[in-house]
Amino acid sequence: MWPSASKALHFFSLRFLALVPALSLTACVSYEPAVLIPEITLSPEQLDLQSGNTGSQQLLDFGVDVGVNESDSLFNVEVLPGVVVRQVSPGGPAEAAGIVPGDVILNINELAINSPDALRSLEQTAAESREFEFTVRRGTSVIVATVLARELSDNPPPRELYRIDPIASRASYRSQLVDLGTEQAVAAEVVSLQPGSPLAAAGIGSGDLVLAVEGGQLNSAQDLVTRLLRDYEPGQELEWTVYRNGRRQSLTVELWDPGRRISRVALGPLLRYESSLSPQSKELTLFDLWLFSFYSYRQQEGERSHSILGLLNFSSDYGELVEEQ
């Protein structure tokens, strides 16, 4: 009896060992960053800080936000004369003139105002006087308010401080022209380091001048930021050429690394696991037999569900467990 049992155990052991390579061939493990890496819009080399998004410079400000004057009826929407005041800037010209949200501006200096664009065009038009007469309807009363528009044309335009890389190097840079003795070169001066910047570990700090990355000469501070965010992978080690105290130095910088997490594991029909950070979800299936699985688990944000043989189904939402009928 014992020899027969020993032979049977030996037989099943051999079958199991023969099955392991087959399972390993179908195993699949995938990795993704442990945290979501935000997408950053790269700035152009030259910024146009003089004009706004509309391409027209605003000269005056009435301090009021307006919209189309529509009727309140849900069944018969009609556009009424004038524009309705949605918001009044605190301390602005319109508030000082007594205009309040809900008022309807009918005319400005006897010019009919029937769209928000008409009011904006007045703000973008040079005027001899800052005094404007607003004809306003409040309920069923029509009043006149004198608004002293605020001039904006004399305000200085925005000025650029620096270019910033909030991800790969977590530092800010400014373009500088450097005299190297025999030649002049453009460098990216390190302005400041953000918390967790990998430049600190590499010995790079504020005031250092970056001349090249991986042997490629820089054209500007934006050129450095663009290369770091576009051409290299998180956690990659790069050779930086830094100029300080009249000398060039080669330093190795390991870009910010978000770490790795297992995003997918598949082991034939025995096990399947998938996870995602956007949206935050997890899914686990054991013994997936096509028509049904022995056990499955799904999590979508705060909602979780469990299923056993497709017969017992449970779901929970932020700790609350309920049974599905």
Image: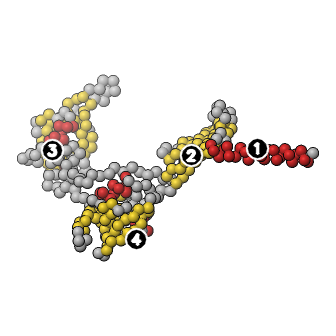
Give 264 or 249, whichever is nearer the viewer. 249
Q: Is residue 111 left or right of residue 244?
A: left
Write down the residue under mark 4.
203
Is residue 142 at all visible to an observer of this figure?
Answer: no
**Residue 234 in the image: x percent, y percent?**
44, 56
Give 247 or 204, whichever is nearer the viewer. 247
Give the number of the mark in front: 3 or 2.
Answer: 2
The earlier-in-sequence mark between 1 and 2 is 1
Report the disc number at residue 15: 1
Query: How many residues crowd mark 1 within 10 Å: few (<14), some (14–19), many (20+)?
Result: few
The earlier-in-sequence mark between 3 and 2 is 3
Cα gap from disc 3 to disc 1, whole angstroms: 84 Å
Q: Is residue 84 left or right of residue 15?
A: left
Identify residue type, mark 3.
Gln
- Residue at position x 21%, y 51% in the image: 48
Report the disc number at residue 124: 3
Q: Quadrant of the N terminus?
A: top right
Asked which secondary structure carries label 3, the reply is loop
Q: In this view, which residue lies farthest toward the left?
A: 128
Identify residue type, mark 4.
Gly
The earlier-in-sequence mark between 3 and 1 is 1
Write down the residue under mark 2.
264
**Residue 55 in the image: x percent, y percent?**
19, 44
